[in-house]
Image: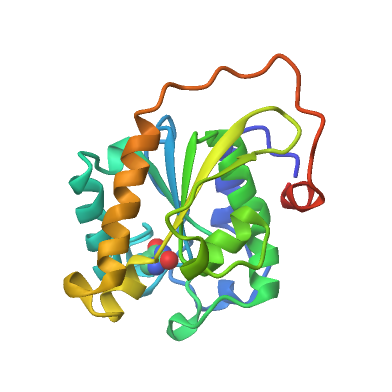
Amino acid sequence: MTWQTLAEARDEALGCTKCRLAGGRTQVVWMDGNPEAPLMFVGEAPGFHEDRQGLPFVGAAGQLLDTMLGSIGLDRSRCTICNVIKCRPPGNRDPMPDEIEACRPYLEAQLRFIKPRVVVTLGNFATRFVLAKQVSISRVRGQRFEIEVPPGQGRVVTVIPTFHPAAVLHGGGNASPAFKALQDDFRLIASVLAEPVPEAPAEAPAVETAEQEALF
Ligand code: URA
């Protein structure tokens, strides 16, 4: 894509008709938060309330996300919140592969221009997109992955996959093992954010994976 700024990418997204989801949306849900912040959350797709308000994570899952942010002393002014898909799938069904591909340039632009230091992926769809691997969230949650974003430019991003807050709500709420895992993962986020910022290497590392290349 030839966008020079995040605003250019946003302006195109707001009028996007590249997939069938454009026909059913009330509005495009671009992002929330502070693009200067080092932390980015990536969710799946807008739901009913997000589609109405034009902001990500404003329904029940968003309340849990806000609570978890508060548990580590943060709020939305200290992070950005995006989704893989910018328009609501009908009935909140899973995004389809061609919808993810149509929307791909927008999240890639958000990652490229915002340059977060830590990316937290919420659930399977976001995790598979960012890691560019068909992983299962229950296997990778709570781990940290250091990957170059964009690849080959020497800027290493820490990716921390965790459960999607909606999955935690549907899976038993506060008493569930998934909630305990979410709490553990937010403690990991806080500790990674507290680490000293690594200096950018003078030269880009020689090794690049094909999977990372595919991401950008
Ligand atoms: N679930 C998501 O993945 N994203 C939202 O914005 C809301 C709910």
Q: How far across and down, in percent of the image, does residue 127 sit?
A: 55, 60
Q: Quadrant of residue 110?
A: top right
Q: Position of residue 24 (x, y in %)?
A: 51, 78
Q: In the drawing, does residue 69 fall left or right of residue 110?
A: left
* Residue 52 to residue 93: above or below: above
- Give 161 or 49, whichever is nearer the viewer: 161
Identify the residue at horizontal 55%, vertical 33% (top origin): 115
Residue at horizontal 66%, vertical 57%? 104
Quadrant (top left, top right, bottom left, bottom right) of the N terminus: top right
Rendered residue at 29%/80% (across/down): 170
State which quadrant residue 151 falls in. top right
- Tell me: residue 195, above or below residue 46: above
| Front in this rendered view, residue 70 or 198 | 198
- Does the rendering let one see residue 207? yes
Q: Quadrant of ligand 1?
A: bottom left
Number of dots carrying numbers: 0
Vertical order, 148 against 196 (above or below): below
Name the spot of residue 47 as percent of width and height, x first. Answer: 39, 72
